[in-house]
Image (spheres, rainbow, N blue to C red):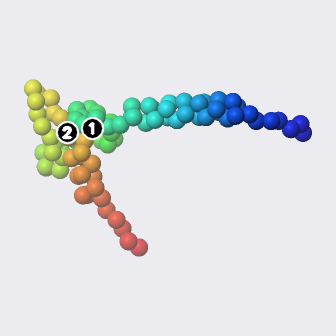
Amino acid sequence: MPTQIITTDDLREFKIELLEEFKKLLENTNSTRVKKYLKSSELMELLKISPGTCQTLRINGTLPYTIIGGIIFYDAEEIEKVMKENSIHNKF
């Protein structure tokens, strides 16, 4: 197997390529962040629930919401808080 010499230029080029790949990964991660306020359809998609379940959770006070101009909005932080408060930890 022939020996290959790696120069500082090769290392610099590798570093630049590696940083570019990290930037791409971070951009993809940032674009998938949850928005501050979600509409009902976005919430149903996020939680994988039906419109009826969404309405029931609103009516019984489980999910806090705001209505502006006939559009229902949910604060993503509040939804996350509700999810954490209602998590169940079974101990065997």
Q: Quadrant of residue 89?
A: bottom left
Q: Which residue is mark 2?
A: 74
For this rendering, which residue is in front, 50 or 87?
87
Name the residue rendered at 35%, 37% in the picture: 33
Find the residue positioned furthest to the top.
69
Determine whether 28 is above or below 83 in the image. Answer: above
Judged from the image, the secondary structure of the residue bearing numbered disc 2 is strand
Determine whether 41 is above or below 47 in the image. Answer: above
Q: Give the amino acid at mark 2.
A: Tyr
Numbered tag placed on residue 34 in the rendering = none
In percent of width and height, residue 78 lies at 21, 47
Which is more N-terminal, label 2 or label 1? 1
Q: Give the amino acid at mark 1.
A: Leu
Q: CA distance from mark 1 to mark 2?
A: 8 Å
In percent of width and height, residue 84 lies at 28, 55
Q: Which residue is mark 1?
A: 43
Mark 1 Cα within 10 Å, few/some/many (few <14, many 20+)? many
- Indicate left or right for 29 with 6 as reference: left
- Indicate left or right for 2 with 33 as reference: right
* Count of picture labels: 2
Find the residue positioned furthest to the right.
1
Find the residue positioned furthest to the bottom.
92
Q: Which of the two discs, 1 and 2, sits closer to the camera?
A: 2
For this rendering, which residue is in front, 17 or 37?
17
Name the residue rendered at 60%, 30% in the picture: 17
Determine whether 47 is above or below 21 in the image. Answer: below
